[in-house]
Image (cartoon, rainbow, N blue to C red):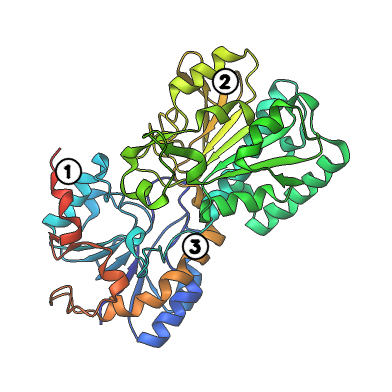
């Protein structure tokens, strides 16, 4: 039986999550009889006393563990030899910044399992932080915009919204936002901000979290094909927030004239499609980007499109973007750098293609925090831990000296093994092309 270790997160001071909460760890240890260690941390949401009550011992490094669970990337110099690591490695796209980490894991003879690739037989992710990036992103963009408009002398109820990390839970945030929603119903929003429209790119778990936050307000859904006319004709009122959720067929169209949209073709051959999103830019007050994106897919908000938006009208409706997906220079091209919760946003000048730090002043406010779930550490950790727990006993019992196929690891886990005993597994051999660059 392998020894389990939960590492202390050290990417930034805001990372307070854990992959296993004490309650779930206690169930695992009771059922398996395994030993567990928890690396001491002065910022983890769950304290050492709670883990000690669950049966874990405290430690000051990772040496005691055979199977090491984390959340974010582990510093290269902390990787130990011949261990099994589970964390979000951010290597599967060949991310240049994390290739030294991947190389070190290879050199160490260790095994790397990435949560992002633990999927069922239909390719659906099984272990993730759920809707909480969407929750935090939606809360934060409302809070930032309230302060942004207040600095310009525009009073809105959003000035009373706290940052996500200032709420004890998502439930508490929802309760407060419901109060703000009632104020909007009673007093309305400033007429010149209306119709107050929010466009959400994507419809998965992250989008769902954002939608739940916005639905604490008095919302009404407007279909993508209707929103342009709705805004242009001045429809709507100042006591309603209008939300449009975009699916792939709303965002892109075939390059070939006369061709129909086909979702599977778009997934497999995105080069055959082009973005159709730019005409929507004038219609929204806020945008929330919650789509999965890779470089082979079209970009939706481009610098060129923003410049054309600025040239078309001196008074741009678009005031804020929450790029929850947060691929720098990605689907939202003006996201040129990720941020953290100390300074979560910067401003984009659509006319000049430049950015300025902070969310107060002229420009489009861009929220670009790349680990938003850490702002809701209790909810996010509990959700994640509940999903991970059923797999942990198999991770501890596996025979890592055998081939991957004979290791005893569940098939869902085997698909997520990027490195096995110091070698890239067949599904990830493409990463050789990215190492050493």
Q: Secondary structure at mark 2?
A: loop
Q: Quadrant of residue 68?
A: bottom left
Q: Could you tell me if the residues under marks 2 and 1 are in contact, i.e. CB atoms within 8 Å?
A: no
Task: Please name which of the two marks, 2 or 3, marks the residue nearer to the observer.
Answer: 2
Q: Is residue 19 visible?
A: yes
Would you place residue 17 above or below residue 401 in this image?
Answer: above
Q: Earlier in the sequence, mark 2 or mark 3?
A: 2
| Closer to us: 412 or 106 | 412
Q: Quadrant of residue 359?
A: top right
Q: Which residue is mark 1?
A: 434
Q: Secondary structure at mark 3?
A: helix
Q: Residue at x 41, y 45 (%)?
A: 12
The C terminus, quarter of image = top left
Q: Residue at x 29, y 61 (%)?
A: 61
Q: Secondary structure at mark 1?
A: loop
Q: How many marks?
A: 3
Q: Earlier in the sequence, mark 2 or mark 1?
A: 2
Q: Which residue is mark 2?
A: 363
Between the C-alphas of marks 2 and 1, the distance is 37 Å
Residue 254 at x, y percent in the picture = 40, 38
Between the C-alphas of marks 2 and 3, the distance is 35 Å
Q: Is residue 163 visible?
A: no
Between the C-alphas of marks 3 and 1, the distance is 32 Å
Q: Which residue is mark 3?
A: 381
The disc at residue 95 is none
Q: Horizontally, is 20 left or right of 415 in the view?
A: right
Q: Residue furthest right?
A: 186
Would you place residue 420 above or below residue 269 in this image?
Answer: below
Residue 166 at x, y percent in the picture = 63, 48
Q: Quadrant of residue 405?
A: bottom left
Residue 335 at x, y percent in the picture = 44, 31
């Amino acid at each position: 039986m392998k020894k389990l270790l939960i590492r202390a997160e050290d990417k930034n001071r805001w990372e307070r999550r854990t992959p296993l909460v004490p309650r779930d760890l206690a169930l695992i240890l009771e059922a398996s009889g395994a030993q567990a260690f928890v690396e001491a941390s002065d910022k983890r949401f769950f304290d050492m006393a709670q883990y000690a009550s669950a049966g874990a011992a405290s430690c000051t490094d990772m040496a005691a563990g055979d199977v090491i669970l984390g959340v974010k990337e582990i510093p290269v110099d902390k990787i130990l030899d011949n261990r099994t690591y589970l964390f979000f490695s951010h290597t599967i796209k060949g991310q240049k910044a994390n290739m030294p980490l991947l190389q070190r894991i290879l050199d160490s003879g260790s095994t790397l399992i990435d949560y992002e690739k633990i999927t069922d037989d239909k390719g659906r992710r099984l272990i993730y932080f759920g809707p909480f990036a969407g929750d935090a992103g939606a809360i934060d963009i409302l809070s930032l915009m309230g302060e942004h408009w207040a600095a310009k002398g525009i009073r809105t109820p959003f000035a009373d919204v706290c940052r996500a990390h200032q709420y004890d839970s998502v439930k508490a945030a929802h309760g407060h936002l419901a109060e703000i929603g009632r104020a909007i119903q009673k007093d309305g929003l400033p007429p010149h901000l209306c119709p107050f429209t929010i466009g959400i790119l994507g419809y998965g778990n992250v989008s769902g979290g954002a939608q739940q936050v916005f639905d604490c307000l008095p919302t009404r859904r407007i279909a993508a094909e209707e929103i342009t006319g709705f805004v242009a004709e001045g429809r709507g009122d100042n006591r309603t927030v209008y939300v449009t959720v975009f699916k792939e067929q709303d965002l892109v169209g075939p390059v070939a004239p006369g061709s129909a949209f086909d979702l599977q073709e778009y997934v497999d051959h995105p080069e055959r499609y082009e973005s159709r999103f730019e005409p929507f830019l004038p219609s929204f007050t806020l945008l929330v980007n919650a789509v999965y994106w890779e470089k082979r897919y079209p970009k939706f908000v481009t610098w060129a499109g923003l410049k054309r938006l600025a040239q078309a009208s001196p008074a741009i409706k678009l005031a804020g973007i929450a790029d929850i997906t947060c691929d720098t220079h990605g689907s939202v091209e003006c996201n040129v750098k990720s941020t953290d919760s100390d300074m979560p946003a910067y401003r984009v000048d659509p006319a000049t293609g430049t950015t300025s730090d902070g969310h107060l002043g002229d420009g489009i406010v861009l929220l670009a925090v790349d680990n938003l779930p850490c702002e809701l550490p209790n909810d996010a950790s509990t959700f994640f831990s509940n999903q991970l727990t059923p797999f942990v006993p198999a991770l501890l019992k596996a025979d890592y000296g055998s081939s991957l196929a004979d290791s005893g690891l569940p098939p869902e886990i085997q698909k997520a093994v990027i490195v096995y005993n110091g070698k890239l597994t067949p599904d990830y051999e493409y990463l050789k092309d990215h190492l050493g660059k």
